[in-house]
Image (cartoon, rainbow, N blue to C red):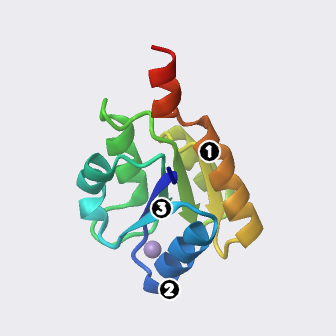
Amino acid sequence: MAKKVLVVEDNELNLKLFCDLLRAHEYAAEPVRDGREAVERARDFMPDLIVMDIQLPHVSGFELIGQLKADPALQAIPIMAVTAYAGREDEERIRAVGADAYVSKPISLLRFVDAVAGLVQKSPDPADEAAQG
Ligand code: MN
């Protein structure tokens, strides 16, 4: 079964780019345009990875990552932050809040896909867990 990726991004062009890219690599991509829906959508979709824009209206990606990592049902899902910021301080803040990786915008397509593949591999596979009993 295809690995599932929830993509939280308010910019329509970036959202389409990320989802098209993920689908081209056989992932099931689920777009979320409004960050206020991100946690609930994560609960419904139970993705293998969440791609999280940091600069969102209404609620920041930092805050959402904090909420996701504080939720026992969701905290194991790896999060890849995507941000236009490139400063060391921002990178440290992204990691401090619990993101597993970050990719800076404008994204390198290859780096994006590599980072996704690396993170999805780390997430527990329900089939493996079932096989182990
Ligand atoms: Mn944005």
At x 23%, y 52%, the residue is 40
Q: CA distance from mark 2 to mark 1?
A: 24 Å
Q: Dot 1 corresponds to which residue? A: 119
Establish if 8 lies above or below 39. below
Q: Which one is in front, 130 or 61?
A: 130
Q: Position of residue 42 (x, y in %)?
A: 32, 51
Q: Earlier in the sequence, mark 2 or mark 1?
A: 2
Is label 1's Cβ within 8 Å of ligand 1?
no
Q: Dot 3 corresponds to which residue? A: 28
Establish if 68 lies above or below 115. above
Please identify the quadrant where the C terminus is shown.
top left
Q: Position of residue 46 (x, y in %)?
A: 35, 46
Q: Is residue 11 left or right of residue 108?
A: left
Q: Is residue 80 left or right of residue 70?
A: right
Q: CA distance from mark 2 to mark 3?
A: 18 Å
| Tags 2 and 1 touching, CB below 8 Å | no
Q: Dot 2 corresponds to which residue? A: 13
At x 24%, y 61%, the residue is 37
Is label 3's Cβ within 8 Å of ligand 1?
no
Q: Earlier in the sequence, mark 3 or mark 1?
A: 3
Q: Is residue 121 left or right of residue 42?
A: right
At x 71%, y 71%, the residue is 109
